[in-house]
Image (tube, rainbow, N blue to C red):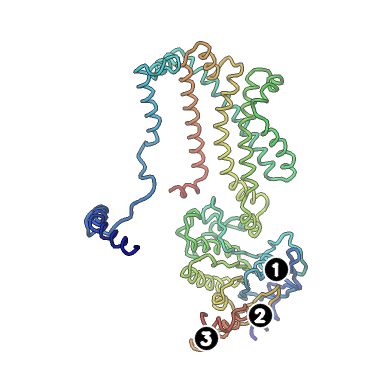
Amino acid sequence: MADLSLTGGQGAIDPSWLKLARSQPAGTADEPRRRRKLGPGRPIPYGAALGPVVLLILWSIGSATGYIDDRILSAPWTVATTGWELIQDGRLQENLWTSFQRSFWGLFWGIVAGASLGVIAGLSRIGEYLVDGPIQIKRAIPALALIPLLMLWFGIGEGMKVLTIALITFAPIYIQTHDGLRSTDARFIELAETLDLSNGQFLRHVVLPAALPGFLLGLRFGVTYSWLALVVVEQVNATSGLGYMINLARTYGQTEVIILCLAVYAALGLSSDWLVRFITRKALPWRKILAD
Amino acid sequence: MAQDSGRLTQPPVVAVRGLTRRYGERTIIDNVDLDIGRGEFVALLGRSGSGKSTFLRALAGLDHGVPGSGRLGTPDAVSVVFQDARLLPWKTVVDNVSLGLKGQTPRERALHALAEVELTARAKAWPMQLSGGEQQRAALARSLVREPELLLLDEPFGALDALTRLRMQALLLDLCARHRPAVLLVTHDVDEAIHLAQRVLVLDQGRFIVDLKVDLPSETGPRQRRFAEVRSELLSSLGVTQEELRRVA
């Protein structure tokens, strides 16, 4: 039974199947057979823009054909012209500048607090015992839940907004810096001992450079969080800023303004993330060769 | 004999007396004595887990918190080369070599040391751009630029391929002939120990069970005979049976 089916199978397969297999590899018969390359294929320049462009086209088609209701989602050209008008009368720049300042100062104080507390907790045991506990507790409390208390303490002015953003951004910077300092490779600590490095030299040449990638990673999170925090504080009683514009537009049913502000948020988020990655590349030149 | 009388006139560089080190219940190093003379090259063999690294780390002063007793006489200038090169990835090769270097013109001295290990061309490269052998040469330069009286080598060529390892061994012999530090080389490679060292120790159950002068004659014939003799003695002290020796070694 087995014999029969085997010979039968071979006979049936042989001629056509073999010919097909021979014609498969590209090139002439003299060329050695190359294996098929696995993987996602070659990168295309600006290929990353493809997804957003497709979305934009679908949105345009939907709006033009009336398939998308203007009250639900304004057409791209409406958003563009509204944007132009808002720039002309200066409202967009004004609100953007206010938002930017809030974000910037919040992030600034977040970096100062996160980095210095991270260093205190990372370099001394006592510091860790004192600092780390309260920060872990603070981290467990959602930032939004703190806002009522912050409003009671600091009013509803700029101080409260900057403080809220700082409170939200400092956490990732603290955690990554602390972690970077704590996880200094034990092998390098041993090396520093055999080289008789002083405490200062050990800090400057071994510990801080080892913690720098962690700090920069924390910074990247912090920058992203600063925009998220901005949205939070500006939608809770603000009289200026992008979040305020969105709230106002909601009241009047202006979806084009909402979309415009969202686009500005996206642009801010993407460009600041790019900026941090650029700083990271400059600050860690020894890492670049890994990517090359 | 000549070395013995030399040792009498000069105090040894390393003088270990009654050294004991424990991990929990286990005694890793058990009441050990050892003298290493000035410029003497000693290899320390042992099966894995025999405590040879523990002994080296004790000499290097790296065994914080390991309980034990005994007297350790080691010089001030001690350099250590580990199995991994341990170059800081965020510093260029020359900055790695000059790291923590005291005295005048540290950079010039580092560059000079790199020239000695034939690595001048890679002085400004990042460590990650170097091959394994080059990294280990940079580590050698880093330890020699400190002019150590005692050089501790913890399986320094263990991670290298056979060819690179051979060239590194030759380089190490040259450097030691020039700088004359006392050397303690921890290795599990019997041939490497015989080729490099003047004296070979075998550590077993926390004690030196063999302390052997290698003394290879210079003529080829007697040299090969002596080599085989030493090798077979060392291998059998490491637990390789005569039967196993006949079949593969």
Q: Residues within 10 Å of mark 1 (few under 14, many from 20)?
A: some
| Amino acid type, residue under disc 1 in the picture | Thr
Separation of residues labelled 2 and 1 (CA atoms): 22 Å
Q: Tell me which amino acid carries mark 3.
A: Arg
**Disc 3 from disc 2: Cα separation:** 21 Å
N-terminal label among 3 and 1: 1
Q: What is the number of the mark on residue B223?
A: 3
As drawn, A250 above or below A119? above
Q: Circle 2 is placed at which residue position?
A: B210
Amino acid on which the number 2 mark rests in the picture: Val
Residue drawn at x 62%, y 64% is B79
Residue A273 in the image, given as x and y percentages of width and height: 50, 34
Q: Nearer the viewer, mark 3 or mark 1?
A: 3
Give whichever of discs 3 and 2 has the lower sequence position: 2
Q: Are marks 3 and 2 in contact (CB under 8 Å)?
A: no
The single residue placed furthest to the front in the displayed view is A1
Q: Which comes before the other along the chain, label 2 or label 1? A: 1
Q: Say if mark 3 contacts mark 1, CB within 8 Å.
A: no
Task: Name the spot of residue B210 as percent of width and height, x first.
Answer: 66, 80
Q: Residue B46 appears in which quarter of the rendering?
A: bottom right
Chain of the residue displaying label 1: B
Looking at the image, which is closer to me, B160 or B12? B160
Identity of the residue drawn at 51% across and 41% down = A280
The residue sitting at the right extreme is B69
Image position, residue B229 (x, y; %) = 57, 86
Question: Dot 2: within a 10 Å radius of its alpha carbon, few (fewer than 14), some, or many (20 or more) residues?
Answer: some
Q: Secondary structure beneath disc 3?
A: helix
The relative height of residue A146 versus residue A181 in the rendered view (above or below) is: above
Residue A243: numbered disc: none
Front of the two marks 3 and 2? 2
Are the two marked residues, 2 and 1, in contact with CB atoms closer than 8 angstroms? no
Residue hosting label 1: B74
